[in-house]
Image (tube, helix red, strand yellow):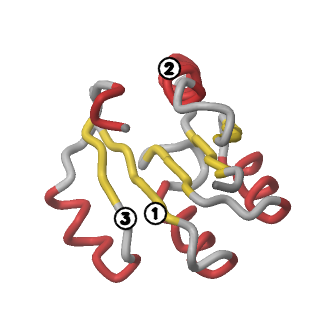
Amino acid sequence: MGQKHILIVDDDNSILRMLEFGLKKLGPNYHISTAENMTSAMRQIEEIQFDLIITDYMMPGMTGVDLVRAVRRLSPATQVVLMTAYGTNKLRDTTDNLHIDGYLNKPFTMDQIR
C-alpha cells in the first residue's frame, strides 16, 4: 500500500490537533498535513495530491464549500469530508452537486473518523 496523504483544515486548533493525533495512529502509511486557514489549505492543495481532505464548514474568509469547489476543480479524485457544528441535513441539500464524500457533525469522536 502506498502512502496516503490527508489534509485537515480547521481554524479551531484543538480540533486540528485532535484529528492530527488520532489519524497519525492509523500507521506510517498515512501522511497527515494540517492547515489553520484557507490560504494555507489552498497552497498545500496546489502542491500536493491529497487522497482525503477533512475540512471545517465555517472558516474565516472562505467556507468549506468554497474549498470543496476549488478541490473539485484542481483534484477531482480527492475525497472530501465536511465537518460542521450546524447540522448536516440543510448543508447536504446545498452541497449535493459537489459530491462530498462524507459529513461529520461536531462534536464527534475519533471512532467516527476511522
Q: Residues within 10 Å of mark 2 (few under 14, many from 20)?
A: few
Q: Which residue is mark 2?
A: 18
The number of callouts visible is 3
At a point 34% along the width and 82% down the height, the residue shown is: 97
Q: Residues within 10 Å of mark 3 (few under 14, many from 20)?
A: few
Q: Quadrant of the N terminus?
A: bottom right
Gap in Å between the C-alphas at discs 1 and 2? 22 Å
Residue 52 lies, in percent from the top left, at: 55, 56
Q: Secondary structure at mark 2?
A: helix
Q: Which residue is mark 1?
A: 65
Q: Is residue 98 above or below residue 51?
A: below
107 to the left or right of 55: left
Chain-order first, disc 1 or disc 2: 2
Chain-order first, disc 1 or disc 3: 1
Kind of residue indicated by mark 1: Val
Residue 110 lies, in percent from the top left, at: 35, 26
At a point 49% along the width and 23% down the height, the residue shown is: 22
Kind of residue indicated by mark 2: Met
- Closer to the camera in the image, 49 or 43: 49
Outermost residue on the right side: it is: 47
At a point 38% along the width and 67% down the height, the residue shown is: 100
Q: Secondary structure at mark 3?
A: loop
